[in-house]
Amino acid sequence: MRKLVFITAAVVALVFQAPAASAAEPVFDPVKLADHVKVLASDAFEGRGPATRAEPKTVDYLVSQFKAAGLQPGGDKAADGSRAWTQDVPLARFEITGPITASAKVGDKTFAWSQGDEVTVRAAATGATRVTIKDAPLVFIGYGVDAPERGWDDFKGYDLKGKVAQDLVNDPDFETGQGAFGGKAMTYYGRWTYKYEEAARRGAIGFMVIHETAPAAYGWATVKNSNASAVFDIIRDNPTKAHAPLEGWIQRDAAADLLKAAGLDYEALKISARSPQFRPVPLPGATVSMDYAVKAEKIVTHNVAALLAGTTHPDETVIYTAHWDHLGIGEPDARGDVIYNGARDNGTGVAALIELAAAFAEGPRPARSVLFLSVTAEEKGLLGSEYYAWNPLYPLATTVGVINMDSLSVAGPAHDFATAGDAPLTLQDDLIAVGRAHGRYFSPDPRPQNGSFFRSDHFSFAKRGVPAISFGAGEDLLVGGKAAGAAAQQDYVSARYHQPADEWSPDWNLAGVATDTGLLYELGEKLANSREWPSWKPGAEFKAERDKSAAARK
């Protein structure tokens, strides 16, 4: 085994000149960060699946670290006023059991589909224990978007009841980079979660997203691994309003072959779908049949919450978040590995959260409270943070801001840094100012078409109006520059993201995580000792929601 090598904090300090006022700021140790990741991403933690035998082990580790740091429990409140270390998160869990029969017909031609190959069917969270679809008509619905404020309606009154719909991933602007949806930057309409919800609202019996790597921003392996395991959802009064009975993805070539058999051309349909004049296109003579059983149950998983109470404004809260969960045990990869360890995603973020908590506990007590929240079920649809946002432990109106950490870079220190989706927030401006003071520059999201703003836990808070950002590591590396950073990111996305290969490696360089954690400490410390209330900028879609609670902030 090769020896673990880091760029040390001393070397980094020669490059990133700290301002004189920050001389007392803590220095974060790459070795300590690495130690946390190696524990959490070990095979003993079995990929940290929520509501599996790995969850108690994960929660116990987090609680032990927060206790050792000297923090207080910040979770659910008991009748006597005491708090637990955790917040119960009740969810519904759905898992396909037994074989999946999937096929399509066009006239006398039959297409037999295999789960994980041509299609990936997920256990839709409707509560049904069996899904049986027999010869349902198939219709292509373009991008599946209804956005009246943008003058866009892909449905044009078409009745989807009893039909299986197929659509394209991302926004209508993706291919050309211009149009009503802001060009390459993905809107919420481009997210597959929105598309599932819209199909359910319109009564479709089934819905399948056509997968292509570029507009999806990830390969088929990620789709297969993320959707073939158990599906979780918050417990809904009427789940069929949010989920069609059949939810899934279909490979691009499989969809194109089906369309061709129906006398239609996939690439021509893609072009027509870019126009606001697009109308749904039924596939002549094409039907879909599916049959599989679903096990449905209610489970309780947990957010872990550690609190450092403020001295003069304890009812005002700065929150750091990082999700502790990953994909657990799933389908074997080419090596036969079935454990999805989640070392970078999100062992790195949790390691930073633990070390931030320790640093705050060791320093002077801040004026405002600071909550260190490690949420569950992010990989199941941001459900732990979603539950918190609707059932907050501390009022959202007086939550100062949320700083999220998800999948930090292990390629070493960078000259730059980023945030997911470039939020129109003064909180992002504050982060940029902190970085500039240390000789670092902000890089706009290099892949806005990926819809990163909607894909991590800060989004659950943003939807409720809370100023929230998710930190993104830079790619202009001290060693190798932008080319090396881009190559490292590409390697991660293609070969490791949501795959068993996301494992701890002795080749990692966590000196970059250490310096990034220092930036986030300084940002949170400034917020916790100020009277600043970060805000959404004019025109931001979540500003109106935040403004509703303005009277609570003084």
Image (tube, rainbow, N blue to C red):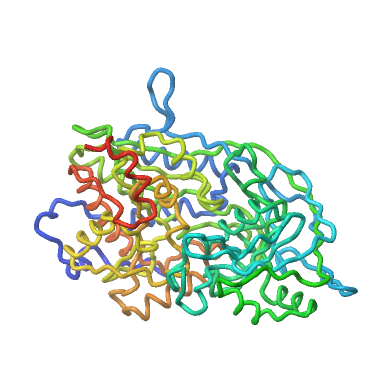
* Residue 335 visible (yes or no): no
Q: Is residue 228 left or right of residue 381?
A: right
On the image, the x and y values in percent for residue 305 come to 40, 38
The answer to which quarter of the image holds residue 317 is top left
Q: Residue furthest right?
A: 108
On the image, the x and y values in percent for residue 100 come to 79, 57
Q: Residue furthest left?
A: 20
Q: Is residue 234 left or right of residue 547?
A: right
On the image, the x and y values in percent for residue 474 come to 33, 69
Which quadrant of the figure contains the C terminus?
top left
- Foreground residue, 319 or 60? 319
Q: Is residue 315 left or right of residue 290?
A: left
**Residue at the image position 53 percent from the left and 53 percent from the top:** 379
- Foreground residue, 273 or 126? 273
On the image, the x and y values in percent for residue 56 come to 53, 39
Q: Is residue 502 left or right of residue 28?
A: right
**Residue at the image position 67 percent from the left and 45 percent from the top:** 240
The answer to which quarter of the image holds residue 128 is top right
Q: Residue furthest top?
A: 80
The answer to which quarter of the image holds residue 431 is bottom left
- Foreground residue, 486 or 218? 218
User: Is residue 193 positioned above or below 174 on the image?
Assistant: above
**Residue at the image position 38 percent from the left and 23 percent from the top:** 82
Instruction: State the count of labels.
Output: 0
- Foreground residue, 2 or 197? 197
* Residue 389 visible (yes or no): yes
